[in-house]
């Protein structure tokens, strides 16, 4: 039986015990990127947060179907129903076919997510690959009387929907208030009501991406793809829908309305939203000069940065904050995160140097630490508390080593399990510099030291010293002790 997991449901504004629809299985849908520019700091947080969540679910024994879409059509510049399609615009400016833009930035996004050690989703559907299904859903909404066609475009009838249901249930906005706070927007003249949103837009002559439909040659509205692809891959009702807080309104609110009309019920059982990253206290924006791409962050090539930051430092920095809390990025904060990560990972090397004793007594403190870590993670992914417990563990390791004490085999195994399952597994943290090569390097050094041991046993001191000096020249310092040979890079 997995541990109880509690997650904060944005819909109810309460922390709820997670109960999947099908025992042992979890269906998770997360809104992915619109691929028209380099992945930036804003992409890193949801990437890491939902990766952490998937890793935790898997560790708890769930089978997870993780769907994260790629938006490659229909996302207009102002996130509403006017302006140019973001990908269309980029393709026009760069004189590229829109799918070249999509392909290029999808690869860049995947590379950045891999650098952050996030696991790929189980399914990564694209909006442009689901036009037929989107047209079918529009027809369903029209048939239900909740949409209207005008000049080749189709809009969702928010006012009518609001008579039977509640538009604003997720974002806790009240339609009447929205109305009074809105000025008339340009390009909305076709709509009956400013908050009606596009399900289908008739393409202007200069619009490159368009498909035939019963209403016009055009393209689907942005909110539609997630309703279509979540139901296609996860079913009419599914467990969890995630995304950034900036997507809650209008994107998720509209998605929820579409789902309600076409499925007759609210199809998402738990809505999760991660908070956003600010930079030196400000919202990130190109006009503010504080827009940082992940490549700039990893290479240090940005006026706000004094040094390059390893992706693992960025990952650790994100995990230091609770996913629903604010996270302010600064050069200093990242540098501090780098030190914290180093200290956490160093604990494992120090552990390896503590001699193992025959003792069969198991430390209650260590068991408590392991329990505290899981309890924090299962309490709505409370990573700051889990990390605090991990640093208690690091302190325990150092205290034991400094006092020249021994460690019981069971305790050592328990700590190794925490590093393996929690630090590397759930938190997805690994050594920075050596990266994926670390196990190989460790194995090779141990092998070379075995040759040196044989040389020493046959009293071939010249050979033994030669190996030691050469390793030292490569930055591997070795120290002979009574029990064997220790080494560090
Ligand atoms: Zn979405």
Image (cartoon, rainbow, N blue to C red):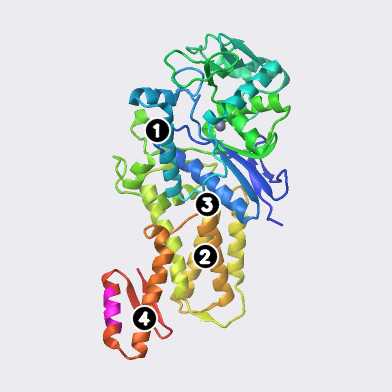
Residue 454 drawn above or below residue 422: below
Mark 2, Cα crowd under 10 Å, few <14 / some 14-19 / many 20+, is: many
Q: Nearer the viewer, residue 140 or 310?
A: 140
- Residue 281, given in percent of the width and then of the height, sits at 41, 37
Mark 3, Cα crowd under 10 Å, few <14 / some 14-19 / many 20+, is: some
Instruction: Please name the predominant secondary structure of the magenta segment in the image.
Output: helix
Query: Mark 2 or mark 4, which is nearer to you?
Result: 4
The disc, 1 or 3, on the residue closer to the chain's N-terminal end is 1
Instruction: Identify the residue position indicated by label 1 in the image.
Output: 37
With 229 as the anchor, is 80 left or right in this view?
left
Answer with the quadrant where ligand 1 appears in the image.
top right
Query: Mark 1 or mark 4, which is nearer to you?
Result: 4
| Label 4 element class | helix
Give yes or no for contact between labels 3 and 2 (Cβ–Cβ under 8 Å): no
**Residue 451 disc label:** 4
Residue 467 drawn above or below residue 65: below
**Residue 384 disc label:** 3
Q: Tell me which residue sits at (42%, 15%) in the image.
A: 206
How far apart in space, not on screen, are marks 1 and 4 (Cα)? 52 Å
Q: Nearer the viewer, residue 285 or 71?
A: 71
Instruction: Identify the residue position indicated by label 2 in the image.
Output: 393
| Label 2 element class | helix
Point out the residue furthest to the front here.
212
The disc, 2 or 4, on the residue closer to the chain's N-terminal end is 2
Q: Is residue 425 visible?
A: yes
Mark 1, Cα crowd under 10 Å, few <14 / some 14-19 / many 20+, is: some
- Residue 410, given in percent of the width and then of the height, sits at 59, 74
Range covered by the magenta-colored residues = 464-470
Mark 2 sits near ligand 1, with its Cβ under 8 Å away: no
With 348 as the anchor, is 173 left or right in this view?
right
| Label 3 element class | helix
Query: Mark 1 or mark 2, which is nearer to you?
Result: 1
């Amino acid at each position: 039986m997995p541990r109880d997991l509690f997650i904060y449901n944005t819909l109810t504004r309460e922390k709820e015990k997670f109960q999947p629809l099908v025992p042992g299985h979890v269906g998770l849908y997360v809104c992915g990127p619109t691929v028209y520019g380099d992945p930036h700091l804003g992409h890193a947080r949801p990437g890491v947060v939902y990766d952490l969540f998937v890793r935790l679910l898997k560790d708890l024994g769930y089978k997870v179907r993780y769907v994260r879409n790629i938006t490659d059509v229909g996302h207009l510049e102002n996130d509403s129903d006017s302006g140019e399609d973001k990908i269309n615009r980029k393709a026009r400016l760069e004189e590229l076919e829109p799918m070249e833009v999509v392909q290029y930035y999808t690869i860049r996004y995947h590379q950045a997510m891999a650098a952050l050690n996030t696991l790929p989703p189980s399914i990564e559907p694209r909006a442009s690959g689901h036009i037929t299904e989107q047209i079918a859903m529009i027809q369903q909404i029209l048939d239900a009387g909740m949409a209207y066609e005008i000049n080749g475009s189709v809009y969702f009838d928010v006012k009518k929907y609001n008579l039977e249901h509640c538009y604003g249930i997720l974002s806790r906005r009240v339609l009447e208030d929205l109305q009074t706070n809105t000025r008339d927007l340009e390009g909305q003249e076709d709509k009956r009501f400013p908050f009606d949103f596009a399900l289908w837009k008739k393409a202007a002559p200069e619009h490159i991406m368009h498909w035939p439909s019963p209403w016009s040659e055009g393209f689907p509205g942005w909110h539609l793809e997630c309703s279509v692809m979540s139901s296609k891959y996860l079913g009419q009702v599914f467990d969890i829908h995630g995304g950034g807080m900036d997507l809650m309104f209008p994107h998720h609110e509209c998605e929820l309305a579409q789902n309600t009309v076409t499925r007759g019920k609210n199809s998402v059982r738990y809505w999760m939203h991660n908070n956003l990253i600010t930079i030196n206290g400000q919202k990130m924006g190109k006009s503010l000069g504080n827009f940082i791409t992940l490549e700039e962050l990893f290479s240090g090539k940005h006026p706000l940065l004094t040094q390059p930051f390893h992706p693992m430092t960025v990952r650790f920095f994100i995990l230091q904050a609770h996913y629903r809390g604010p996270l302010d990025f600064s050069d200093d904060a990242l540098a501090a995160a780098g030190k914290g990560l180093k200290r956490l990972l160093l604990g494992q090397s120090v552990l390896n140097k503590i001699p193992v004793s025959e003792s069969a007594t198991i430390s209650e403190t260590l068991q408590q630490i392991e329990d505290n870590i899981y309890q924090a993670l299962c309490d709505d992914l409370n990573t700051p508390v889990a990390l605090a417990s991990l640093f208690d563990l690091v302190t325990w390791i150092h205290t034991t080593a400094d006092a020249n004490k021994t460690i019981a085999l069971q305790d050592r195994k328990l700590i190794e399990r925490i590093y393996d399952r929690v630090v590397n597994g759930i938190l997805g943290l690994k050594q920075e510099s050596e990266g994926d090569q670390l196990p190989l390097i460790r194995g090779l050094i141990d092998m070379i030291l075995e040759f040196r041991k044989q040389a020493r046993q046959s009293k071939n001191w010249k050979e033994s010293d030669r190996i030691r000096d050469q390793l030292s020249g490569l930055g591997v310092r070795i120290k002979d002790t009574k029990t064997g040979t220790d080494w560090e890079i």
